[in-house]
């Protein structure tokens, strides 16, 4: 088994044992789509494309926020308890360590996003009788676009949490997550050709997500072990 897989599996196991993070993610992934279902049902007016577009619009921020929730446990936890020093002594590069942790964060975040999407589809179908579970563009959104954005958010926030001190992380963490959400909203507002889901929108979101993922990898590559050690409280 590769080093990357070992690190990722470790982080996934730790995420599944963190009850507070799981409960927070579960509440948000269920509460948010249920609260949004009524407004989506009213605004869409039974239009399948409009319903699919609305679900796509809310699931992307949910996925990004899930990444933020699990990042705190994967990156900051080991700074607080000091175990990051042991990990830095392991025969693995810092970038590979970051990659494994980012994947370990992205997997549970993606699972929670899928749960949120399923709740949204079921709630709206119950209110309007419109089912969008088989919409090709919506499925593409769930399979290709959302995972890239989750990986980008987990990677950027994780790199920042490794490089910065605890006080700076408290500020920057919120700034990054809200920056992601505002960026998503801005792209959806500027590019959207109507209330429905579109191939153009999905292509732009995928391209921007890949660019952010590449940026996260570049930033993580510039973080040094010495820098991390200096930020341990």
Image (cartoon, rainbow, N blue to C red):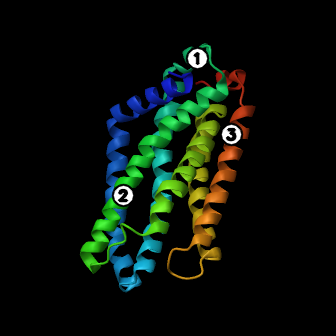
> Does residue 208 appear anywhere in the picture?
yes
Q: Is residue 4 left or right of residue 163?
A: left
Q: Residue at x 60, y 47 (%)?
A: 152
Residue 61 higher or lower than 95, as above or below: below
Q: Nearer the viewer, residue 90 or 114?
A: 114
Residue 18 higher or lower than 117, as above or below: above
From the image, tell me which residue sits under label 2.
Answer: 116
Closest to the camera, between mark 2 and mark 1, is 2
Tag 3: Cα neighbours inside 10 Å, few (<14), some, or many (≥20)? some
Q: Secondary structure at mark 3?
A: helix
Tag 1: Cα neighbours inside 10 Å, few (<14), some, or many (≥20)? some
- Residue 217 bears which disc, if any? 3
Residue 32 higher or lower than 174, as above or below: below
Q: Is residue 193 left or right of residue 69?
A: right
Residue lying farthest to the bottom in this orientation = 45
N-terminal-most mark, 3 or 2: 2
């Amino acid at each position: 088994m590769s080093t990357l897989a070992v690190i990722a599996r470790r982080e996934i196991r730790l995420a599944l044992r963190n009850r507070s993070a799981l409960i927070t993610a579960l509440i948000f992934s269920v509460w948010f789509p249920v609260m949004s279902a009524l407004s989506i049902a009213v605004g869409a007016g039974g239009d399948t494309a409009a319903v699919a577009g609305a679900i796509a619009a809310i699931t992307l921020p949910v996925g990004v926020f899930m990444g933020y929730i699990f990042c705190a446990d994967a990156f900051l936890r080991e700074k607080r308890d000091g175990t990051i020093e042991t990990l830095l002594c392991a025969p693995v590069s810092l970038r590979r360590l970051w990659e494994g942790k980012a994947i370990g964060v992205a997997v549970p975040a993606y699972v929670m996003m899928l749960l949120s999407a399923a709740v949204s589809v079921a709630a709206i179908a119950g209110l309007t009788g419109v089912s969008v579970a088989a919409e090709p563009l919506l499925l593409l959104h769930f399979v290709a676009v959302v995972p890239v954005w989750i990986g980008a958010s987990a990677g950027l926030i994780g790199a920042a949490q490794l490089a910065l001190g605890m006080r700076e992380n408290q500020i920057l963490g919120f700034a990054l997550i809200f920056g992601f959400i505002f960026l998503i909203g801005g792209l959806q507002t500027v590019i959207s050709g109507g209330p429905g889901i579109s191939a153009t929108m999905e292509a732009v979101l995928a391209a921007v997500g890949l660019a952010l993922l590449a940026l996260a990898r570049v930033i993580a590559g510039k973080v040094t072990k010495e820098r991390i050690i200096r930020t341990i409280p």
